[in-house]
Image (cartoon, rainbow, N blue to C red):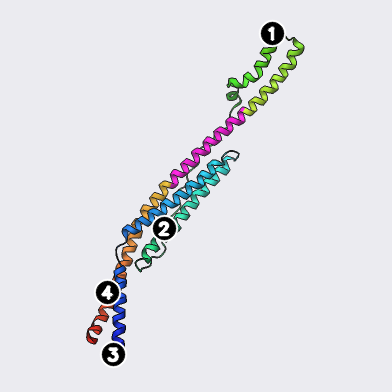
Amino acid sequence: MADRYADAVRARRHELRAQQALLVPGRTDLRDALAAARTGTLAEAAAHLADVRRALDGHPAAAVSAAARAIETAAYARWADRAVGAERGTAADRGVFLPVPPDDPPPAPVPDPPIPPRARIVEVLADAGAWRLAVLPLAALSGFAGPAVLLPALGGAVLVLVAAVRARRAGVDRARLHRWGTDLLAVTHARVDAELTRRTAARATTATARLDAALAHRRAEIDAELTLLAPREVADA
């Protein structure tokens, strides 16, 4: 019976020493894991923003803004999940457990860049191209055509001018909205980048402190149990 007890004590002491050997500092590994979580999350957000950028034309400003904000919110949630995985993975490699920290508060809302107004008619008319479409046919007829020809031509020129103004105004509006959407997505990417950098730095500070405390607590537990087992192993020897 004594030999069985002594063998069990030796086996337990061997197990505890193996666990003790795992309790190495993990600050560097944890910081690297959190940095990888930030990099992966930012890359995913950038890819989603690029998808929105490719589909800008034909979508109203409200839809583009909603898509950008949804991507930003999802990025923060995705980073939080990855950060928890990084912390728990680093801790598990050392045989300890880290509880899930409270969620980071959402960043303060930031208003979107102002939506550009529609192009004014005078802006479109200031473009010589719009006038040229209507004036050139009249200029060609004015030298040899009489009123019977010029009056209908004038009416046709007015219709051409109206159509040209509408088309050019729509084109200007699309270009302005496209630039606005591109700027909005760029601002969103920069904001996500800055916020993830801030969160990663803050989490690295608190997580390494919690990991150090967990390692110290586990070391103390192992040392205490080894101390209790030492006399019995010596006595049995």
| Tag 1 residue | 143
Left or right: where 129 falls relative to 220: right
Question: In this figure, which residue is indicated by the disc labeled 2?
Answer: 83
Q: Tell me which label, 2 or 3, sits earlier in the chain.
A: 3
What residue is at 36 percent from the left and 54 percent from the top? 202
In magenta segment, residue 180: yes
Q: Earlier in the sequence, mark 4 or mark 2?
A: 2
- Earlier in the chain: of badge 3 and badge 4, it is 3
Q: Which residues are magenta?
A: 168-192
Q: Earlier in the sequence, mark 1 or mark 2?
A: 2
- In the rendered image, the residue lying farthest to the right is 148
Mark 4–mark 2 Cα distance, whole angstroms, equals 31 Å
Name which residue type carries label 2: Ala
Q: Quadrant of the C terminus?
A: bottom left
- Which one is closest to the eye, mark 1 or mark 4? 1
Q: Alpha-carbon distance for marks 2 and 3?
A: 49 Å
The three-letter code of the residue at mark 3 reads Ala
Q: Residue at x 60, y 21 (%)?
A: 129
Residue 157, compared with residue 24, is above or below; it is above
x then y, percent, for residue 77: 47, 55
Q: Any mark on residue 223, and which?
A: 4
For label 2, the crowd category at 10 Å Cα-Cα, with few meaning under 14, some 14 to 19 and many 20 or more, is many
Structural distance between the alpha carbons of marks 3 and 4: 24 Å
Q: Amino acid at mark 4?
A: Asp
Q: Is residue 78 magenta?
A: no
